[in-house]
Amino acid sequence: MTTKQNLHDAAREVMKNAHAPYSNYHVGAAVLADDGQTYVGANVENASYPEGWCAETSAIAAMVANGAKHIKEVCVVTKSDPPGTPCGGCRQRLSEFADAGTSVHIANLDGIVRTWRMDELLPGAFKLKG
Ligand code: THU
């Protein structure tokens, strides 16, 4: 199985654990880090709506908690048509750990629908360095 298929499987699987009782919009994210591990996350909503957070943010937190700091590839799964792309805040968070050319796959349950480069999703990304 290819890397992107593995990422899609992982994101689709974790999407089932989303806590999204308010929007009913379930999101799963999987990031492949440079330690060779895949880290996953789902969106976590809250009765105090602004306190919820996104699936990509959960996956990034899992990666950082495990000591990895570089994202090689990303897959985000939703059921929507067309499938959802990362929100603005998550584009910035992904950009912190990814390269301009990092592939961000956008998928539904059946598979990857479109692949974006990080710098297509967030042109002119803010970075403190360089
Ligand atoms: N959501 C994500 O998990 N990732 C995104 O990039 C966009 C939005 C979540 C947040 C909220 O739980 C639900 O989708 C509806 O906005």
Image (tube, rainbow, N blue to C red):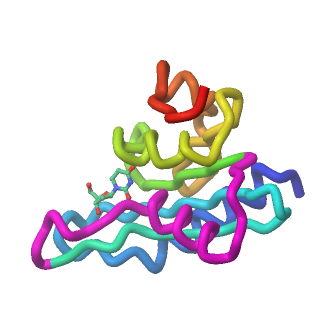
Most foreground residue, 12 or 47: 47
Q: Position of residue 72 (x, y in %)?
A: 75, 47
**Quadrant of res 50:** bottom left
Q: How many marks?
A: 0
Q: Outermost residue, left direction?
A: 48
Residue 32: x percent and y percent?
73, 57
Q: Residue at x 54, y 60 (%)?
A: 29
Q: Nearer the viewer, residue 28 or 69?
A: 69
Ligand 1 sits in quadrant: bottom left
> Is 47 situated left or right of 19 in this image?
left
Can residue 83 be seen here?
no
- Magenta-colored span: 47-72
Residue located 42% across and 37% down the image: 82
Q: Is residue 87 visible?
A: yes
Please say whether residue 32 is one of the residues in the magenta stretch.
no
In percent of the image, x 20 and y 76: which residue is there? 46
Quadrant for the N terminus in the image: bottom right
Task: Kindly identify the residue that appears in the image at 64 percent across and 49 percent down.
Answer: 74
Corner quadrant of residue 117: top right
Instruction: Give x and y (percent) for residue 3.
Output: 82, 53
